[in-house]
Image (cartoon, helix red, strand yellow):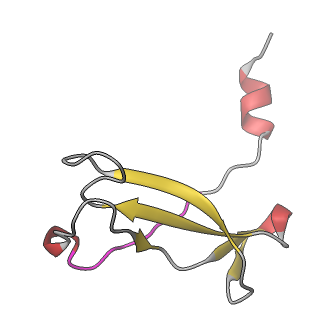
Amino acid sequence: MSNNADIESEAWLTFFWNVENYSYCWQEQGIEVFSPAFKVGMLENAAWHLVVFPNGDTEEDFISYFLIRAYDDDSKALR
Protein backbone atom coordinates (compact mmCIF):
# COMPACT_ATOMS: atom_id res chain seq x y z
CA MET A 1 0.00 0.00 0.00
CA SER A 2 1.36 3.39 -0.99
CA ASN A 3 1.21 6.56 1.06
CA ASN A 4 2.08 10.23 0.52
CA ALA A 5 5.60 9.75 1.92
CA ASP A 6 6.33 7.36 -0.95
CA ILE A 7 5.13 9.86 -3.52
CA GLU A 8 7.16 12.72 -2.06
CA SER A 9 10.37 10.68 -2.15
CA GLU A 10 10.10 9.83 -5.86
CA ALA A 11 12.29 11.78 -8.27
CA TRP A 12 10.54 14.01 -10.79
CA LEU A 13 11.41 16.53 -13.45
CA THR A 14 9.56 19.42 -15.04
CA PHE A 15 10.64 20.37 -18.56
CA PHE A 16 9.36 23.62 -20.07
CA TRP A 17 9.48 23.90 -23.83
CA ASN A 18 8.22 27.05 -25.51
CA VAL A 19 7.38 26.43 -29.16
CA GLU A 20 7.42 29.86 -30.78
CA ASN A 21 4.58 30.56 -33.21
CA TYR A 22 2.90 27.24 -32.39
CA SER A 23 -0.42 28.58 -33.70
CA TYR A 24 1.19 28.72 -37.15
CA CYS A 25 2.11 25.02 -37.07
CA TRP A 26 -0.36 23.83 -39.67
CA GLN A 27 1.78 20.94 -40.82
CA GLU A 28 0.36 17.95 -42.54
CA GLN A 29 -0.45 14.90 -40.49
CA GLY A 30 2.71 13.02 -39.49
CA ILE A 31 5.02 16.08 -39.50
CA GLU A 32 6.83 16.46 -36.17
CA VAL A 33 8.46 19.24 -34.15
CA PHE A 34 11.40 18.21 -31.91
CA SER A 35 12.37 19.86 -28.63
CA PRO A 36 16.02 20.51 -27.87
CA ALA A 37 17.72 17.43 -26.44
CA PHE A 38 18.03 17.25 -22.66
CA LYS A 39 19.49 14.88 -20.09
CA VAL A 40 17.98 14.00 -16.74
CA GLY A 41 20.47 14.16 -13.85
CA MET A 42 20.09 10.54 -12.72
CA LEU A 43 20.29 9.22 -16.29
CA GLU A 44 23.27 11.21 -17.53
CA ASN A 45 24.08 8.88 -20.40
CA ALA A 46 20.57 9.10 -21.86
CA ALA A 47 19.51 12.20 -23.81
CA TRP A 48 15.83 12.76 -24.58
CA HIS A 49 13.57 14.81 -26.88
CA LEU A 50 9.92 15.70 -26.66
CA VAL A 51 8.30 15.27 -30.06
CA VAL A 52 5.00 16.95 -30.98
CA PHE A 53 2.88 16.26 -34.04
CA PRO A 54 0.65 19.39 -34.21
CA ASN A 55 -1.82 17.70 -36.58
CA GLY A 56 -1.50 14.15 -35.27
CA ASP A 57 0.91 11.30 -35.83
CA THR A 58 -1.45 8.74 -37.34
CA GLU A 59 -4.81 10.49 -37.05
CA GLU A 60 -5.68 14.07 -38.05
CA ASP A 61 -7.20 16.70 -35.74
CA PHE A 62 -5.32 15.46 -32.68
CA ILE A 63 -2.10 16.63 -31.07
CA SER A 64 0.27 13.70 -30.59
CA TYR A 65 3.32 13.93 -28.35
CA PHE A 66 6.04 11.50 -27.40
CA LEU A 67 9.17 11.26 -25.28
CA ILE A 68 11.96 9.64 -27.29
CA ARG A 69 15.58 8.88 -26.61
CA ALA A 70 18.12 10.97 -28.52
CA TYR A 71 21.33 9.42 -29.77
CA ASP A 72 23.62 12.43 -30.02
CA ASP A 73 25.56 14.06 -27.21
CA ASP A 74 24.81 17.79 -27.65
CA SER A 75 22.31 18.03 -24.80
CA LYS A 76 22.38 19.61 -21.34
CA ALA A 77 21.91 17.77 -18.05
CA LEU A 78 18.96 19.00 -15.98
CA ARG A 79 19.17 18.69 -12.19
Question: Residue at image x 27%, y 79%?
Answer: 20
Q: Which corner quadrant of the image does residue 1 belong to?
A: top right
Q: Say left or right for 71 vs 18.
A: right
From the viewer's side, name the closer residue of 21 and 13: 21
From the viewer's side, name the closer residue of 47 and 60: 60
Question: Residue at image x 77%, y 16%?
Answer: 2
Q: Is residue 20 magenta?
A: yes
Question: Residue at image x 30%, y 52%?
Answer: 56
Q: Say left or right for 32 vs 50.
A: left
Vertically, is 58 above or below 35? above
From the viewer's side, name the closer residue of 69 and 4: 69
Question: Residue at image x 47%, y 64%?
Answer: 51
x and y percentages locating residue 13 in the rendered image: 64, 56
From the viewer's side, name the closer residue of 71 and 16: 71
x and y percentages locating residue 64 in the rendered image: 37, 51
- Magenta-colored segment: predominant secondary structure: loop
**Start and end of the magenta stretch?**
14-21
Q: Is residue 18 magenta?
A: yes
